[in-house]
Amino acid sequence: MSTSRFLPALRVMLALQTVALLLQAITAGLLLSTPGGRGLHNASAGVVLVTALLYLVVAILVWRPGGGSPRAVAPAVAMVVLVLAQAMLGALHMKALHVPLGVLMFGGSLVQLVQVLLARRAVAA
């Protein structure tokens, strides 16, 4: 990655997205164990969507006006698509696909976050 002025924002958005996905998993557990869990799970799904959309906006800013690599845009687009698919699967109560996709999304977000943080260290060194 280049030294775009938007890279710190990309790191922050990836961290927020990863935390939102972790909270989504926590509220999934609450969904199964408490009466109010469904509302919390639905609300945290909205947070995940907002963070994924903001991640996409920041990835585009890193690329176009920031002069960075366009490589950050593809994972951001993929995450938005996965979030929308995840919401549809959840609404259709297709747990056999909804749960593994959620795990995949969290893992993918965590991998992206680590890559961006390691790229920062490589530039600093």
Image (tube, grey):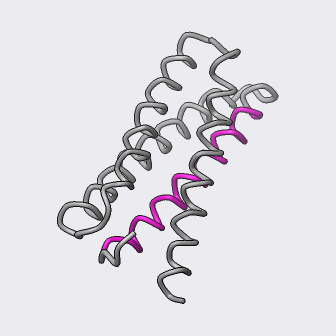
> Is 3 located above or below residue 92 in the figure?
below
Q: Position of residue 5 (x, y in %)?
A: 30, 77
| Of 86 and 65, the residue lying toward us | 65
| Of 93 and 37, the residue lying toward us | 93
Asked whether 26 falls inside the magenta stretch, the response is: yes
Q: What residue do we see at 45% from left, 60% from top?
A: 13
Q: What residue do we see at 31% from left, 74% from top?
A: 4
Taking the view exactly as shown, the residue that stands out farthest to the bottom is 125
Q: Position of residue 118 (x, y in %)?
A: 58, 72
| Of 80 and 112, the residue lying toward us | 112
| Of 74 and 59, the residue lying toward us | 74
* Left or right of residue 99, residue 74 in this image: left
* Left or right of residue 113, residue 54 in this image: left
> What kind of secondary structure does the magenta stretch mostly adopt?
helix
Q: Position of residue 50 (x, y in %)?
A: 40, 45
What range of the chain is rendered magenta?
Answer: 6-30
> Is 107 located above or below residue 68 in the figure?
above
> Is 88 located above or below residue 120 in the figure?
above
Q: Position of residue 117 (x, y in %)?
A: 55, 71
Taking the view exactly as shown, the residue that stands out farthest to the right is 33
Q: What residue do we see at 23% from left, 70% from top?
A: 66
In which quarter of the view is residue 29 placed?
A: top right
In which quarter of the view is residue 95 placed?
A: top right
